């Protein structure tokens, strides 16, 4: 479903020899929940950008749902993104539109028939627990609620994977727990989740797979842990 | 339809920026329009002067009327000639008295020679063609002299050419400045909505979909700017006409429509360039 095969990424303006990612390989299966951890600058966001093809690898290959970074055309990137749900730390909502308009926006811009939009929007807002605040503007919502709107927008197109880049980074502890619970529910309904986070407490509180990065390299992948432990034994 | 609605919503959401874009386009086109109006009026004035371009072949006294009639008939068949009028000595005298008014008594007898007054077709009034016709008329034995105000015609054409070249050069300069200004104002509009654009891309909108509302917005801005420029140019013409006391011509409907369409095209071009650049960057 998602495969990184010996991926190295060097940004054009980076210092000579400095790569954002070096020889990174991993596979994420359908419906999996994966944490991506590591300090700032470790390469977490680069992995996410490569995943939604905002960046292309310098070497190696990224495969997402049948699309390969080697072959994907500019016009196909939009098609791929319709199958992904993406959420950021800063929510990225349109401030002048209500919660439901923000969610509907994601459907309108991909040409969804107008008649089916209200039903889908309502379902997505209900899923994130914000049905009662559909007509509120982002500034009238708390940080946690704004992030829920962003989740509803990401989910409204039934993505096969939800990509979350530090989704709790701007939230207090209570809101963080709420968002994490939401992510569990989303995953339980069959959507894979790839969540980049600094919040180690959150990572430790669950037994989901964790990929840890440092200086652009994978330093730990819990999926390999049993194998490594077995090798040590 | 959605693209059109989005474009209209953009006007409602950022009325000040939209007004700024429309005004900028209007003033660029207004400058262009004023120059165009001056050029149009110069052209009209020159055309009126040009209509008076006439070749006059003076006839030797005593030439038989039949010979003059045959020559007149032959000359009127030249492709450059509009019509030929035979002016007898009596008619020449009458005309001189009429034209000179208070000095009419100077002419007491038929001292003025008869002539062939030849009017040329529009398009055949340039110095080279006039000279060609003059040479052929000089070929007739009974033609004494030919007058056609050579220097005057050459000057007139030189003036017209200078006006034409200056018109094209200044017009192009104004158009280029207008496109740059429009590009910059629409770039501001694009930047004001860069967040929206980045979200659109994130959720899978195609570049064409993102571009469409901006192109529509640019075109509408251009059309409104063009109409405003047309109104401003008309008012300027009226005010100038009133204070300077001369009659001026205004653009006809075809040129007016072309001007507005030109505004739309500038708006479209400005948006296309700005959005294209932005999309390549993000």
Image (spheres, coloured by chain):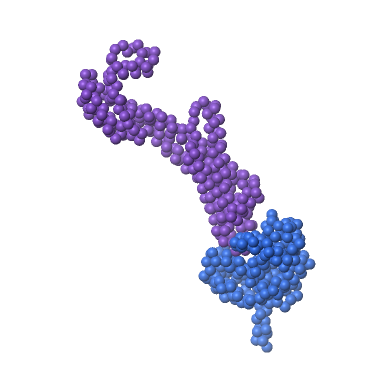
Chain colours: A blue, B purple
Q: Is residue A76 visible?
A: yes
Looking at the picture, tell me which residue is in the foreground, A228 or A72. Answer: A72
A99 is higher (above) or lower (below) than B166: below
B267 is higher (above) or lower (below) than A97: above
Looking at the picture, tell me which residue is in the foreground, A173 or B143. Answer: B143
Asked if residue B165 lies left or right of residue A208, the reply is left
At a point 40% along the width and 32% down the height, the residue shown is B47
In the picture, the quarter occupied by the N terminus of chain A is bottom right
At a point 71% along the width and 60% down the height, the residue shown is A99
In the picture, the quarter occupied by the C terminus of chain A is bottom right
Q: Is residue A220 visible?
A: no
Question: What x and y, as percent, mark residue B110?
Answer: 28, 14
Question: What x and y, as percent, mark residue B8?
Answer: 61, 50
Asked if residue B178 lies left or right of residue B98, the reply is right
Question: What x and y, as percent, mark residue B253?
Answer: 49, 39
Of all residues shown, which one is farthest toward the right? Answer: A174
At a point 43% along the width and 34% down the height, the residue shown is B43
B24 is higher (above) or lower (below) than A94: above
Asked if residue B114 lies left or right of residue B5, the reply is left
Of all residues shown, which one is farthest toward the bottom? Answer: A233
Q: Which image quarter: residue A12?
A: bottom right
Q: Which image quarter: residue A150?
A: bottom right
Question: What x and y, as percent, mark residue B60?
Answer: 23, 21
At a point 54% along the width and 36% down the height, the residue shown is B233
Numbered-mark total: 0
Q: Which image quarter: residue A215?
A: bottom right
């Amino acid at each position: 479903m998602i495969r990184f095969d010996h991926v190295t990424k060097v940004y054009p303006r980076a210092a000579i020899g400095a790569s954002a990612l070096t020889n990174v390989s991993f596979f994420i299966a359908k419906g999996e929940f994966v944490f991506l951890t590591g300090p700032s600058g470790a390469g977490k966001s680069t992995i996410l950008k490569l995943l939604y093809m905002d960046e292309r690898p310098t070497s190696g290959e990224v495969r997402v749902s049948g699309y390969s970074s080697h072959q994907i055309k500019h016009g196909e990137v939009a098609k791929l993104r319709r199958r992904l749900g993406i959420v950021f730390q800063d929510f990225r909502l349109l401030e002048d539109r209500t919660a439901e308009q923000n969610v509907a926006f994601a459907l309108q811009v991909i040409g969804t028939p107008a008649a089916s939009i209200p039903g889908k929007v309502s379902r997505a807002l209900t899923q994130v627990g914000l049905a009662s605040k559909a007509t509120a503007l982002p500034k009238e919502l708390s940080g946690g609620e704004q992030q829920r709107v962003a989740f509803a927008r990401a989910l409204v197109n039934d993505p096969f994977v939800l990509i979350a880049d530090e989704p709790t980074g701007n939230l207090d502890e209570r809101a963080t727990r709420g968002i994490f619970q939401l992510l569990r529910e989303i995953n339980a309904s069959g959507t894979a989740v790839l969540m980049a986070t600094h919040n180690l407490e959150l990572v430790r509180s669950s037994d989901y797979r964790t990929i840890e990065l440092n200086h652009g390299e994978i330093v730990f992948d819990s999926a390999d842990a049993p194998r490594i432990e077995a090798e040590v034994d | 339809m959605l693209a059109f609605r989005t474009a209209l919503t953009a006007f409602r959401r950022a009325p000040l920026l939209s007004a700024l874009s429309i005004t900028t386009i209007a003033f660029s086109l207004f400058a262009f329009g004023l120059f165009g109006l001056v050029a149009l009026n110069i052209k009209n004035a020159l055309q009126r002067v040009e209509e008076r371009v006439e070749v006059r072949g003076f006839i030797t006294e005593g030439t038989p009327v039949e010979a003059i009639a045959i020559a007149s008939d032959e000359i009127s068949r030249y492709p450059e000639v509009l019509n030929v009028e035979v002016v007898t000595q009596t008619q020449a005298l009458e005309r001189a008295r009429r034209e000179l008014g208070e000095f009419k008594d100077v002419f007491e007898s038929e001292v003025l020679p008869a002539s062939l007054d030849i009017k040329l077709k529009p398009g055949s009034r340039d110095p080279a063609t006039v000279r060609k016709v003059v040479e052929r008329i000089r070929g007739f034995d009974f033609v004494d002299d030919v007058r056609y105000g050579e220097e005057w015609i050459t000057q007139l054409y030189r003036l017209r050419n200078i006006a034409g070249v200056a018109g094209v050069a200044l017009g192009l300069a104004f158009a280029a400045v207008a496109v740059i200004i429009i590009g910059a104002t629409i770039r501001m509009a694009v930047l004001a909505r860069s967040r929206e654009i980045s979200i659109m891309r994130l959720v899978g909108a195609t570049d064409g979909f993102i571009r469409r509302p901006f192109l529509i917005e640019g075109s509408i801005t251009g059309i409104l700017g063009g109409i405003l420029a047309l109104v401003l140019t008309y008012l300027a013409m009226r005010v100038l006409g009133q204070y300077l006391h001369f009659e001026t011509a205004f653009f006809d409907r075809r040129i007016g429509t072309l001007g507005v369409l030109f505004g739309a095209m500038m708006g479209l071009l400005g948006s296309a360039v700005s959005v294209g650049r932005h999309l390549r960057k993000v």
